[in-house]
Image (tube, rainbow, N blue to C red):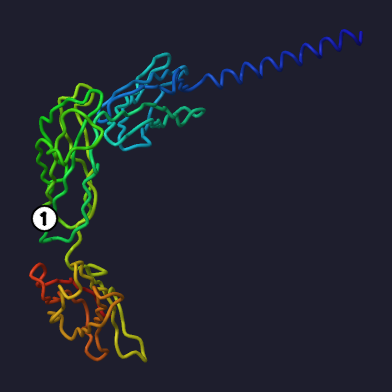
Amino acid sequence: MKTIRRSYLLALALLVIACVSLSSSAQEAAGPKAVVPTTVLDLGKNPRGERLETKFTIENQGTETLRITDTGSSCACMVVAADTEIAPGEAGEVVVAIDSEVLEGPSRVTAALVTNDPANPKILLQVMLEAVPYLAAKPGFFHYTVHRGFQERGEIAQTVAASDPPEFAIERVESTVPSLEVSFREAEPAERIAGYQGSQYRLIGVLDPDAPVGPLTGFVRVHTTHEKQKLFSIPVSGFVRPVVALTPPRLDFGTFSIPEGEDRYGVTLRVQHFLENADDLQITKIETDIPNLESELHEGRTDHDWFLDLWFEKDKAPAGKFNGTVKLHTTSELAPIVELEVKGERV
């Protein structure tokens, strides 16, 4: 009798376990389920500068619609596009486009997918490739650090040569930096890169003296007849500084009051010039259209800068809001007047 009872209890326990297992399996199967058969693709060797494209397959093995809600990549050179909805039992595509212009040698770039699959909310897909440069440039970059309105010519020259095979021709060049113009011609014997046979070309990049203030970033793209590399890119970098820089570039006194015991309220700015010699620019006069704003200039940290104090005397500080300009008159024709916007409110 005891043996029968034990057998009955054991069977009941196994039945309960089986039911729990089936319930868990059903819960796991419910909802979307993202499955990517291959998460790594190798594109092998490719000429640097080529635009490459490849595809991944993503399957929905769940019972509800799989949604891809966002995409991203580890490199600005990669663009990721994916089917946003995949029905149960269906498969979708993830298209990855890669611009190898900024790559050189073996590289691995990653695409990221954000999904509504609770078990797999973020999927990483990797593309491996080797960007092979069949063309070479010396020095290999256009780098400028100048001030706006510079008087010397902003010219940098490159020699471009090829290997495997060494013969090629340049069809055209284009600059992605609007203020940089580039021309080309065949290289003279003294301009050739040693160790390279075949045709060689000289690129001459000239930066406009009126280039806007700010960073220089982009490429010079060289379109060629080379059978293995039709596009060759040379990076552009650097910075165009203002002739005179004010720190901060605009002055906001904010909302202020002058405390008891204080006889003035003011701020200090740094005035810096980027001309070659310290004596190439001197400040001769300071004027403003803001009533009762006082100013004083004194020595800075180097022989190329000053500290400018601007303040209001307590009894002369304006009431309410004010907005105006401080003008610095200099001895340089490149920046004869430097203007500073000034605003604030006294309460």
Q: In the image, what residue occupies the spot 23% across and 31% down?
A: 196
Q: Residue furthest left?
A: 333
Quick one: quadrant of the C terminus? bottom left
Of 333 and 29, which appears nearest the observer?
333
Q: How crowded is mark 1: few (under 14 residues within 10 Å), some or many (20 or more)?
A: few
The residue located at (26%, 69%) in the rendering is 247
Describe residue 27's horizontal placement relative to residue 186 as left or right: right
Q: Which residue is drawn at 9% across and 41% down?
A: 183
Q: Is residue 53 above or below residue 109?
A: above
Residue 251, x across and y down, in percent: 24, 71
Secondary structure, mark 1, is loop
Q: For the image shown, how many numbered marks are present on the structure?
A: 1
In the rendered image, the residue lying farthest to the right is: 1
Q: Image quadrant of residue 58?
A: top left
Q: In which quarter of the image is the N terminus?
A: top right
Task: Give the x, y percent position of residue 108.
Answer: 40, 31
Q: Which of 117 and 78 is in front in this view?
A: 78
Give the residue number, with chain letter if any, for mark 1. Answer: 153
Q: In which quarter of the image is residue 279?
A: bottom left
Image height of 102 relative to 338, above or below? above
Task: Residue 285: give x, y in percent of width and height.
Answer: 13, 82
Task: Give above or below for 319 relative to 168.
Answer: below
Residue 15's quadrant in the figure? top right
Towards the viewer: 44 or 135: 135
In the image, taking residue 238 as reference, residue 7 lies left or right, namely: right
Q: Residue type at mark 1?
A: Arg
Q: Return the x and y of residue 262 as percentages of the image width and height.
A: 34, 89
Residue 279 lies left or right of residue 23; in this view the side is left
Pick whichever, 321 or 303, lies toward us: 303
